[in-house]
Amino acid sequence: MMDAPRTDAVRAIEECEKAGIRVVMITGDHKLTAMAVAREMGILSEGERALTGEELEKIPDEDLVRDVEQIRVYARVAPEHKVRIVAAWKKRGHVVAMTGDGVNDAPALKRSDLGVAMGITGTDVAKESADMVLLDDNFASIVSAVEEGRGIYDNIRKFVRYMLSTNSGEVLTIFMATLLALPLPLLPLQILWINLITDGFPALALTVEPKESGIMARRPRDPKAGILSGGIGFHIVWVGVLMTVGALAMFVWALSNRPDAAEHNEARTLVFYVLTMFQVFHVLAIRVEQKSVFTEGFFRNRHLIAAALGTIGLQLLVIYAEPFQSAFRTYALPWEEILVATVVASSVFFAVELEKWIRRRRDRAPR
């Protein structure tokens, strides 16, 4: 007689292994039964161990901490054994999630970093002790939640990267213009427009960016790593510098072509436009964190494409529509200058794609 494992559970175990998540079985079954099921599900491999609660009793805490990563199955355990297992994994520096449904699981659920209680078969005590209740009692749902969480965290990092990079470009442009004794490259109302409109819509669209392919093949991130880890801090700096160099180069070029322009509004309009286009090209590149935008699908986030096109349209409206010209003190630029500014701004897109290519090459290199 045999109670075969669910197919979706076996697939979920495989997904966990790819994602760097170790699955440990803790059961009240006989040791031989537990080992047979664990092997069938891909939890127990050659060279890994299985212990009973009686055998666990004889192991000191320090030995358990040392060997816990090699023990994948625990059979016939008591509630206090589960707490010891959770504590040993945590002492090894791991983030521990614990599933359970009974009253005797409550202490371990409480001790773990993430306690997951069963919503259908779980007792009220288990649900109260847990951080999360699994409504369908399906292990595969936990794996799906991990995948969704990784996607959400990726989008948060993209949002932060975009906002800080673009703002650093604006701040550095004004700072360097002042340092070089140049006229003010942007007026206060123009800065406000960039921050509210040309920053805002693409940033919001980033939050619904679909998950990247292969997201569950990554290793778990270091829980101690900050949101700016993984090169984001360096990215913010070099993108800000690139935007500053491009914007000031266009500003100086426009000033030299029109030295007598009233209050330099024509040159400011060019900076106003080129900074906006820098941000549009930047957001189109960083929407995919590791792979190329072209391999992931350039048009997969229709909200972002719409936001980018809407931003460009509104910017052109401010530059060419007369009611906005008087409010923002802009000038109708020749289309040749618009084209040059667009080409200059597109440099950030290709620079970000190059950065990702270098990072992929580095990650594939033998260590």
Image (cartoon, helix red, strand yellow):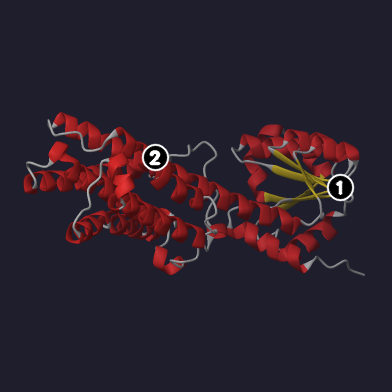
* Mark 2 secondary-structure assignment: helix
Can you give x and y, in whole percent of width and height, for residue 138 in the image? 79, 57
Q: Is residue 2 left or right of residue 284?
A: right
Q: Nearer the viewer, residue 221 or 355?
A: 355
Q: Quadrant of residue 58?
A: top right
Name which residue lies at 85% across and 39% down: 126
Can you give x and y, in whole percent of width and height, for residue 347 in the image? 25, 56
Q: Which is closer to the viewer, label 2 or label 1?
A: 2
Q: Residues within 10 Å of mark 2 (few under 14, many from 20)?
A: some
Amino acid type shown at disc 2: Asn
Name which residue lies at 28% across and 53% down: 320
Q: Residues within 10 Å of mark 1 (few under 14, many from 20)?
A: some
Q: Nearer the viewer, residue 91 or 151?
A: 151
Q: Is residue 226 left or right of residue 60?
A: left
* Mark 1 secondary-structure assignment: loop
Position of the C terminus by quadrant:
bottom left
Contact (Cβ within 8 Å) of mark 2 with mark 1: no
Amino acid type shown at disc 1: Arg
Q: Quadrant of residue 289?
A: bottom left
| Residue matched to label 2 | 195
Observer able to see residue 318? yes
Can you give x and y, in whole percent of width and height, for residue 47 in the image? 65, 57
The label on residue 76 is 1
CA–CA distance in space, label 2 to label 1: 61 Å
Q: Is residue 149 left or right of residue 318?
A: right
Name which residue lies at 68% across and 55% down: 143
Q: Is residue 115 left or right of residue 245?
A: right
Name which residue lies at 86% across and 47% down: 76
Can you give x and y, in whole percent of width and height, for residue 147 in the image? 61, 55
Marks 2 and 1, the one that precedes in the sequence: 1
Position of the N terminus by quadrant:
bottom right
